[in-house]
Amino acid sequence: MAASRIVVVNPNSNDEVTAGIDRALAPLRFADGPEIVCETLADGPIGIETQGDVEAVAPLLRQRVLAGDADAWVIACYSDPGLHACREATVTPVFGIAESGLLTALQRGERIGVVAILRRSIARHMRYLRALGISERVGGERPLELTVVELADEGRTWNRLVEVGRELREIDHADVLVLGCAGMARYRRRLEDRLGVAVVDPTQAAVGTALGVVVEAAADD
Amino acid sequence: MAASRIVVVNPNSNDEVTAGIDRALAPLRFADGPEIVCETLADGPIGIETQGDVEAVAPLLRQRVLAGDADAWVIACYSDPGLHACREATVTPVFGIAESGLLTALQRGERIGVVAILRRSIARHMRYLRALGISERVGGERPLELTVVELADEGRTWNRLVEVGRELREIDHADVLVLGCAGMARYRRRLEDRLGVAVVDPTQAAVGTALGVVVEAAADD
Amino acid sequence: MAASRIVVVNPNSNDEVTAGIDRALAPLRFADGPEIVCETLADGPIGIETQGDVEAVAPLLRQRVLAGDADAWVIACYSDPGLHACREATVTPVFGIAESGLLTALQRGERIGVVAILRRSIARHMRYLRALGISERVGGERPLELTVVELADEGRTWNRLVEVGRELREIDHADVLVLGCAGMARYRRRLEDRLGVAVVDPTQAAVGTALGVVVEAAADD
Amino acid sequence: MAASRIVVVNPNSNDEVTAGIDRALAPLRFADGPEIVCETLADGPIGIETQGDVEAVAPLLRQRVLAGDADAWVIACYSDPGLHACREATVTPVFGIAESGLLTALQRGERIGVVAILRRSIARHMRYLRALGISERVGGERPLELTVVELADEGRTWNRLVEVGRELREIDHADVLVLGCAGMARYRRRLEDRLGVAVVDPTQAAVGTALGVVVEAAADD
Amino acid sequence: MAASRIVVVNPNSNDEVTAGIDRALAPLRFADGPEIVCETLADGPIGIETQGDVEAVAPLLRQRVLAGDADAWVIACYSDPGLHACREATVTPVFGIAESGLLTALQRGERIGVVAILRRSIARHMRYLRALGISERVGGERPLELTVVELADEGRTWNRLVEVGRELREIDHADVLVLGCAGMARYRRRLEDRLGVAVVDPTQAAVGTALGVVVEAAADD
Amino acid sequence: MAASRIVVVNPNSNDEVTAGIDRALAPLRFADGPEIVCETLADGPIGIETQGDVEAVAPLLRQRVLAGDADAWVIACYSDPGLHACREATVTPVFGIAESGLLTALQRGERIGVVAILRRSIARHMRYLRALGISERVGGERPLELTVVELADEGRTWNRLVEVGRELREIDHADVLVLGCAGMARYRRRLEDRLGVAVVDPTQAAVGTALGVVVEAAADD
């Protein structure tokens, strides 16, 4: 069992984001459990904000998966870039944090609200929700509309999270929220407490799901 | 972290089934991970085969959850009896193996096929798939149509699993299967190897998902 | 034909509600038509407000149906508790007032608005609408948010019905309303006149539908 | 109450069909109940088999409704010709037998099978099912593919009803059937007995629903 | 190729509207391309505003198509009157401007907003969107609520177009608009420039689609 | 008007396919109409058969669109690679042949059947149909299952087209077919004649739609 490895790939080249993911996943590391490795994608773009960015990074992720060795892969970007290209390239299970975060949220509430970073991502996410076949369960998606620099300001980010989360709860009638970003785990619990609805961090959700699948496989060995 | 407990409740009063679930979950127990406790529901019926059985056991499950102490509950019956009554009764996350198994399967294939035990359960499951909002992703559900006594015959059960799985793959175009029962984990890997499609054991899937949510909560403490 | 009996069961133990249902159904009693019997469920709870209440009462309804003698059963609670458990237990047609009220409303307008009593019932009703497969035709559901004591105040209840009905018409674009409660028939016509949209009382709708099915059966004898 | 009138209009000019409808509705006539009048549409076509026929008869039905006096109208043709044109022309409730038959069937089974007369009607019915918003609940529609002359042969018609009904039950997994025609009530019960699934006659269903709505209105006077 | 003819039928008897359509289609006429003929339907009603109008005009359109000679027909009224009756009557392709406009809009944006002329048309359009099977892609429809006389006032019409278009963009989150009327092509470009979203004129869209199909047929001769 | 240019990009590097597309589009070229330019994508892969191929070519298409000059772009590969990445990169309309072919087919029949080249593309196409929001209108997709070499054998390809088309018509009840490939226009008319259902060539459909949009834009200048 100790040999099992879950590799979490941050597709943008921002090591700080990778470090944040690593911290958020620490509690899922057990003495005799699967190893959880977080890495930054070599040659990944600075940020993944557009459909163009998503498609540009997909072949790099596919190569990474083909070249690598893991019992499960997690793509840690809320656009799930390259998810199906990777799945097709390997029999190893591959998880995307948007897909896992949304499907976990379906188990925590009746109606999902998604906190997006940028407004221009929303149409892309809507297409994806329809492709997943779960759009009937999503009440709405609303953007923080903050730049990367602004996101570094924790107070400002927190205020927007509360504002946007309230709109999702009050206007869109969401009773569970998904943080639409790989790097926001540190706000999850506080937001849950403030707003009184479940909040899902998609990276933790995806690694949790991967953990279940990895051990499920091991169970039969 | 060592204090976390996931309680898996087998709602029928069959201790043998509970023991089988316990064995299937052994690989998810880590030295420093959440405790995973499997228990038989006191006063649960012999079997849960009808809507009447499902509704009769729901209040018992709700009482169990209200009386108990856990960081996550898993209801280990493929009809997810009492799932929403339990969720409403507690802020602790509650998982149903049908819901978790199906949502995990969405991450392993494009089109789900469900192996039911009995034909008469299928209409009930169809209503549930629509309530979940994912029926568009399910290609079909087909029954083994075996009695409890016949299910005890492993050879016979295996043959039917292969037959039914093939029909789901060939006729319903499923590329991932869910075992629609709490007690079939021991066939999972073999069936996957025989049919060449992913096969999900719903109890392992639900406990895997619960594990992720429990550690997600712990991550923020 | 005179021998036909439609039994309307009020699942909560409130005889006053049963008496109100009985008055609302008086015009459906014909000299040579089916007998319409309204009864209070023995051992029913005081109120049915939660999923827990719904599931607790289901086995009692199933027993009632199994023990009884009727040509059609109507379960007179807007959560349709035990509907499928009862259907499974008998070949006699069983109707639920939520299902019948909503399907009748589809024949009176393009887009349904539901007047709920309590906000916390709405998520449960949404699951049910999806299970019915008609959520695309429902514009919204909004609560009166009145307690049982407050509901006894007719003036206050009327004012809330008008307010909530207006929101359903103006904000959710509903052109037909369903009263989401067994005991509001007396407001139906007035509300229709005030708001200028059709308003459906679900108990009258269900008994009307049952009447059609009962005589349909008799037609072939 | 004795003054209430339900007018059932047979839109084709075949008086024999009207007489058959009248016989099928006899059990819904009560001494002190609403009057139920069956009439043949003046100038209606011989048969209604195409979209062209449907649209040609709609203005005639609209005129009939505008000129007439009723507490409810029933359009007794399985294509529901002119249904929305009539609804728009009057505040009096108007029912279509296809809509009513299908919505009644949703209360008798999980998955509907429709017995069509002709194959070429099926695409038209599919559009209508989508417009109703209930296509998810319909397993299939299959044609008798019999001419009017052949339909007059009861033995032949019966044999086809059993064949087609079996296909709907076995291949399309329907557990409730709707007879897709105004003139087949006399086979309903026999078919139900033969196939072991509920069978809905849409004209009886529509008049039953109308009866409920008419008395519902009267209840509040 | 020069022999190909696309006949655009304005189903209302307003020659001024036909002349406007003709001007809007001028750029689609090529020296060696298909002839594009615009005509007013003989005996068509003054306006088509209700379901009754729609059904009344359908048989006239069917007769026109049966009597005529064309390589493609376009019905130039946003209710697509008689579309399926015409399709059934001929093997020649028939296009409706609502259907073509909406399906073209799906290729220009993620979420459609429809500018209706009158509020009372919206329920009819909603049924039609469901029958088309694309309602999931439509964010909303909002009316100008202007009479024919008011529509003649270009300044007033323009102001309402901007107001309603803004509501569709801001409240319903539409990123592409469809002008729900045959006679508004002259505002299309200006509205696109003002609101910053694509705007589709449905008559141009339908004739464009017809052009493609006509030449597609010619390509294989 | 003569200045308008529609650029059709074949994303695979096979010049023979581009030449075939060019021939199929000849009838859409008018003396005074938009120029239609067919080109092979520089550095495109040999074939596009997997999700990996689709994502690898997307950035190249995006660069092409950014670098180029056109009034409309058409991506001539049935997987619509890079469609949304290109749309996001330019205000110029961009069309994908799968999307255009399917939406044109919705205007020619009730239920679409798609002829795929390879079985392994079908799951990818199913995701895409859901993302488009039109999966309810698609009866099925079936593969020719021919290699590129086998596709060069016209007799063999024709036989498979007829076989697969018949299955789509008989088993999946399709009444309009879409050729799921850029290079099959030469079989379109013959297949239509043989099977008696409309057959859509997606490249011709997309260029037809583009033509309409380009002239629509010109109409307002």
Image (cartoon, coloured by chain):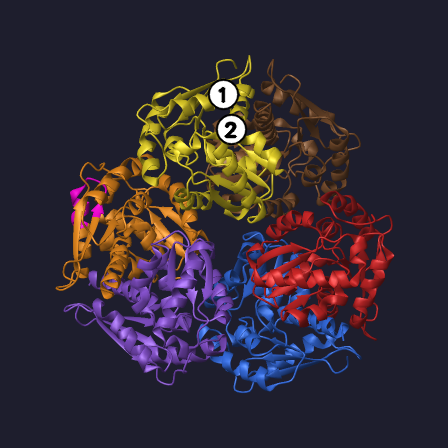
Chain colours: A purple, B orange, C yellow, D brown, E red, F blue
Label 1 secondary element = helix
Tag 2 residue: C185
Residue B11: in magenta span: yes
Judging from the image, mark 2 belongs to the subunit labelled C
- The reply to whether residue C102 is visible in this rendering is no
Of the two numbered discs 1 and 2 on the same chain, state the one appearing first in sequence.
1
Query: What's the CA distance linking mark 1 and mark 2?
Result: 9 Å
Of all residues shown, which one is farthest toward the left?
Answer: B31
Q: Quadrant of residue C131?
A: top left
Residue range highlighted in magenta = B9-20
Compared with C217, E145 (above or below) is below
Compared with E14, C41 (above or below) is above
Bin the neighbour count of mark 2 within 10 Å (Cα to Cα): few under 14, some 14-19, many 20 and up.
Answer: many
On residue C23, which mark appears? Answer: 1
Label 2 secondary element = helix
Q: Indicate left or right for F168 with A196 as reference.
A: right
Q: Amino acid at mark 1?
A: Arg
- The residue lying at 55 percent from left, 27 percent from top is D188
